[in-house]
Image (cartoon, helix red, strand yellow):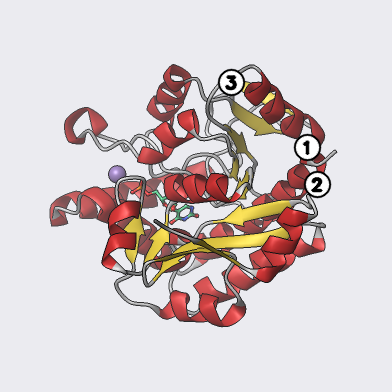
Amino acid sequence: MYTLDISDEVQAALENNKPIVALESTIITHGMPWPQNYHMANQVEDMVRAHGATSATIAVIEGRIKIGLDQSALKTLAQTQGARKLSRADLAICLVDGATGATTVAATMILAHLAGINVFATGGIGGVHRGAEHSFDISADLQELAQTPVTVIAAGAKAILDIPKTLEVLETLGVPVIAYGQNDLPAFWSRTCGLNAPLRIDDPAQIAQAQKMRTALGLSGGQLVANPIPSDAEIPQDQIEPIINRALMEAEAKGVSAKAVTPFLLQRIFELTDGRSLESNIALVLNNARLAAEIACAMGK
Ligand code: PSU
Ligand code: MN
């Protein structure tokens, strides 16, 4: 029915049981502007390699599942206007249509798992949006973490979300939320958000062990590792919060809804911070790629 177009590099790593880190593509097409998105994608790949793992950026190109994109494919995707934003609900139809789409956290987890990859680095996961009690806007990323056995390394949930509600839903779904190296739950651009994370691990090898233990116990799903943004790149919560609020008000006034909400907010926050939010976003993705490579290396042992 379908084939996975696995790059030679990723194929070789799979055959030799070498560490692999999956990377998503929605962050490229919907999360950052050109050309910073393309530079980020390359830097992230380099970071994974520098830490001993093979990187596999995942996307759907003209109806074909790609596990590992080369530089020219990355460059083309980074400039593609109107690529679909693919979550669990959208994947099959994108393939049937022969269309091009970027994978969100949820869809990247699904395809990574199909390819046999169990570690994945991104920026921040989707979650429960503020005002979800009215909009019911809860990212499919959360359900995916509950059912697909992939460890996702993020800088927490994006601060544009309702973080306490996101934590509650993850708890209900049985998803471990593990802060790396601190008690506080990081919140994307900020190292803390005033809440403790439910769990904490300081050693990448233990994070790898925990994923294996989950599977051994017959527990479905993955884990969320919340890795704090490096201090020198952080925007403290009291600085970013008024900007988030302004962007949220604009989104509401404009009637932005569904899949468009997160891309709209990230773009407006980029404009309102004169690009600082993007610099932070790139720094935290790189930091997550490094930790993901360390976890992937430990997974093989
Ligand atoms: N991390 C980033 N930027 C992004 C995303 C993650 O630094 O743009 C994307 C991921 O693909 C995530 C999606 O799955 O945002 C969440 O979208 P939504 O809120 O519509 O579920
Ligand atoms: Mn949504």
Above or below, 79 against 49 in this view is below
Q: Residues within 10 Å of mark 2 (few under 14, many from 20)?
A: many
- The yes-or-no answer for disc 2 within 8 Å of ligand 1 is no
Numbered tag placed on residue 198 in the rendering: 3
Q: Total of numbered circles in the picture? A: 3
Residue tagged 2: 297
Percent from the top left, x then y, of residue 35?
50, 79
Q: Secondary structure at mark 2?
A: helix
The amino acid beneath tag 3 is Pro
Residue at x-position 25% and y-position 32%:
132
Nearest to the eye among marks 3 and 1: give it.
1
Q: Secondary structure at mark 3?
A: loop
Secondary structure at badge 1 equals helix
CA distance for labels 3 and 1: 17 Å
Q: Amino acid at mark 2?
A: Cys
Q: Position of residue 36 (x, y in %)?
A: 52, 74
